């Protein structure tokens, strides 16, 4: 289910980017689009990365799996 949702989200993002980059009314340069989208992506991904990495968010301790590597 997550895979389908992420694929649909990526497809929607691609369509919106295409419209913004080719629209005559609101012509947007690709670097400006990146400037506007990168902070939003970071805000969305940061909480997930803090809570889902190794199951121990911000503890500073490595899990046994990570320590074995």
Image: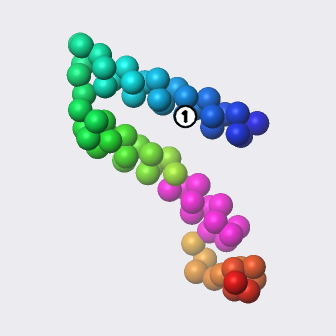
Vertical placement of residue 24 versus 37, above or below: above
Picture residue at 52% right of the left edge, 26% below the top: 12
Q: Which residue is mark 1?
A: 10
Quadrant location of the C terminus?
A: bottom right
Quadrant location of the N terminus?
A: top right
Which stretch appears magenta? 46-57
Vertical placement of residue 65 versus 22, above or below: below
Vertical placement of residue 33 versus 45, above or below: above
Between residues 6 and 48, which one lies in front from this camera angle? 6
Vertical placement of residue 63 versus 24, above or below: below
Is residue 46 found left or right of 25 in the rendered image? right
Between residues 62 and 22, which one lies in front from this camera angle? 22
Q: x, y (%) of residue 9?
A: 57, 32
Picture residue at 47% right of the left edge, 29% below the top: 14
Q: Residue furthest bottom?
A: 68
Is residue 32 found left or right of 61 in the rendered image? left
* Picture colour scheme: rainbow
Membership of 33 in magenta stretch? no
Q: x, y (%) of residue 29?
A: 23, 32
Picture residue at 39% right of the left edge, 28% below the top: 17
Between residues 41 and 61, which one lies in front from this camera angle? 41
Is residue 56 found left or right of 45 in the rendered image? right
Picture residue at 24% right of the left edge, 19% below the top: 26
- Element at badge 1? helix
Between residues 14 and 49, which one lies in front from this camera angle? 14
């Amino acid at each position: 289910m997550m895979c389908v949702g992420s694929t649909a989200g990526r497809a929607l993002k691609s369509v919106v980017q295409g419209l913004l980059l080719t629209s005559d009314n609101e012509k947007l340069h690709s670097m400006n689009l990146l400037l506007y989208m990168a902070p939003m992506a970071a805000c969305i991904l940061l909480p997930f990365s803090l809570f889902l990495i190794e199951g121990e968010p911000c503890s500073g301790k490595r899990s046994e799996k990570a320590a074995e590597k």
